[in-house]
Amino acid sequence: MKHIFITGGVCSGLGKGITAAALGRLLKQRGLKVTAQKLDPYMNIDPGTMSPLQHGEVFVTDDGAETDLDLGHYERFMDENLTKYSNLTSGQVYSKVIANERAGEYLGGTVQVIPHVTDEIKRFIYATTSENTDIDVLITEIGGTTGDIEIQPFLEAIRQIHLEKEASLFIHVTLVPYLKASGEHKSKPTQHSVKDLRAIGISPNIIVTRADEPIKTEIKRKISSFSNIKPDCVIENMTLPSLYETPLMLHKNGLDSIVCRELNLQTPEPDLSEWQNMINRIANRNFSITVAIVGKYVSCWDAYLSVVEALNHAGFVFGARINIRWIDSDTFDNLKDVHAVIVPGGFGDRGVDGKIRACKYARENKIPFLGICLGMQVAVIEYARNVCNLADAHSTEFVPKSVNSAPIIDLMPGQETLINSGGTMRLGAYPCKTLSGSLLQKLYNSSDISERHRHRYEFNNDFRNILTENGMTISGSSPDGMLVEAIELPNHPFFIGVQYHPEFKSRPNKPHPLFLGLVEAGIAYNKTYST
Ligand code: GLN
């Protein structure tokens, strides 16, 4: 197994994750078995307890890990399902070290960052390799930026792995800023960032430069000689109209062949024809529809990253650009001129009234609607209130049972004490049976599906009858029939709510059936109602 370590320099938000994901795809297309992982230096055990406004969405794996959103890029680009071995945080490392210390594992020793913390990081990386013995290449991305205080133990750990394992490679992704006044790109920040890495004993083999415009050869030469890197190992990664073009651009610029050369991997050239066809479809989109996303984190688009990507993937198939209309659930007053509505997942009562209004508007005006997780819950609340005359209907997440005569969304028994604790929700993949004759079953074309979950509250079975008697269909349930997984309205062209998160399983070249259905219905709605 070969290791590729990806670090970031100069600033965060460079698209290191996309570089890692795109490289993963290129190596996969060369016939190699590849997996990827992200090591995050922050102290939370996982991002599950962080505000999406700070950290973007929480990406959930099949095995129920709450992880960094970069894992979504890895899955989408590489088309591989990742696991809990794909994300490690300082919080996990330190809590393990402290638990070990209390258990007497280091008896007699002084517990220190080096070697105890760094050993724990190495153990995680090596555990990934021993769990995945068929893998040829493990790509490990280190979150944060060189120079961050929390990143040091991670850099020290990968430096040691490089010593222990010849077959490893360091790729450093840096910003090359452009100064308008002097009309040139600047190599100095990259030189400094490489200097920082070298000071702790890491000499990058490859530098990937991030810039919005092409960089002159002269600047690349400068980076190469000042950073002691082979000239062809300075590889340009320029901002492109679609992030899915990244693998093709990096291939054109030689990244995968240089990685294989440096790691001594003998492979054929990658077959990128299918990916290229997809890029052609993306480039040839010739009309657009507008989809409203109604949520409370709309100021941070990353909070709904996988939802937006899943919509785009469906749009690629129909040649449609998806304009997202971000609707703040706290303040919006109408949903005019949108062709589809999504109420995505969420937590807490702020904005819930607005989400309920959005469901009502989409239901009454027959606008295609997809409710995801909390979005399904509010769709059920709205229906109970306005169609079933249960005026009090609410979730016990927002109104306690003691004052709620219609707790239509409620906790599962035994969950009461776990609210606000990390890692205690229904997490990861669960099977679901779709109802024969339902739109859900038609879209999936299957009676048995599996989807990823991240929630604590469920549809309350005490209210099943009243809702179904009033026209709502329960179109998906757990195999034992106990948990409602999906609802739909048969007298509406497309009104579906799902308790799970379909967005995590969409791929650019394999769009998710629910998003395909929603976008198709949105296109039909646009044709019918636009003047
Ligand atoms: N807050 C809701 C619950 O915990 C929905 C969660 C979500 O949308 N991911 O059940």
Image (cartoon, rainbow, N blue to C red):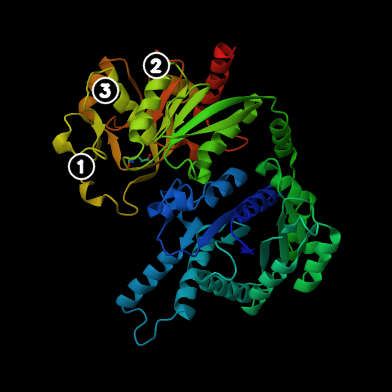
Residue 91 drawn above or below residue 228: above
Q: Which mark is residue 29?
A: none
Residue 311 horizontal/vertical position (percent): 55, 32
Q: 113 and 62: which one is in front?
A: 113
- Of the residues under marks 3 and 2, which one precedes in the sequence? 2
Real-space Cα distance between discs 2 and 1?
A: 34 Å
Label 2: which secondary element: helix
Outermost residue, bottom direction? 108
| Residue at 44%, 27% in the rendered image | 370
Can residue 434 be seen in this snapshot? no
| Residue at 58%, 60% in the rendered image | 141
Q: Do the CB atoms of the residues marked 3 and 2 lie less than 8 Å apart?
A: no
Q: Amino acid at mark 1?
A: Pro
- Of the residues under marks 2 and 1, which one precedes in the sequence? 2
Q: Which mark is residue 385?
A: 3
- Of the residues under marks 1 and 3, which one precedes in the sequence? 3
| Residue at 58%, 38% in the rendered image | 507
Q: 121 and 342: which one is in front?
A: 342
Q: Which mark is residue 364?
A: 2
Real-space Cα distance between discs 1 and 3?
A: 24 Å
- Left or right of residue 26, residue 508 in this image: left
Residue 262 horizontal/vertical position (percent): 75, 65
Q: Amino acid at mark 2?
A: Glu
Label 3: which secondary element: helix
Q: Which mark is residue 413?
A: 1
Quadrant in the rendering for residue 275: top right
Label 1: which secondary element: loop
Q: Quadrant of ligand 1?
A: top left
Figure quadrant of the N terminus? bottom right
- Left or right of residue 525, residue 248 in this image: right
Residue 395 drawn above or below residue 178: above
Real-space Cα distance between discs 3 and 2?
A: 14 Å
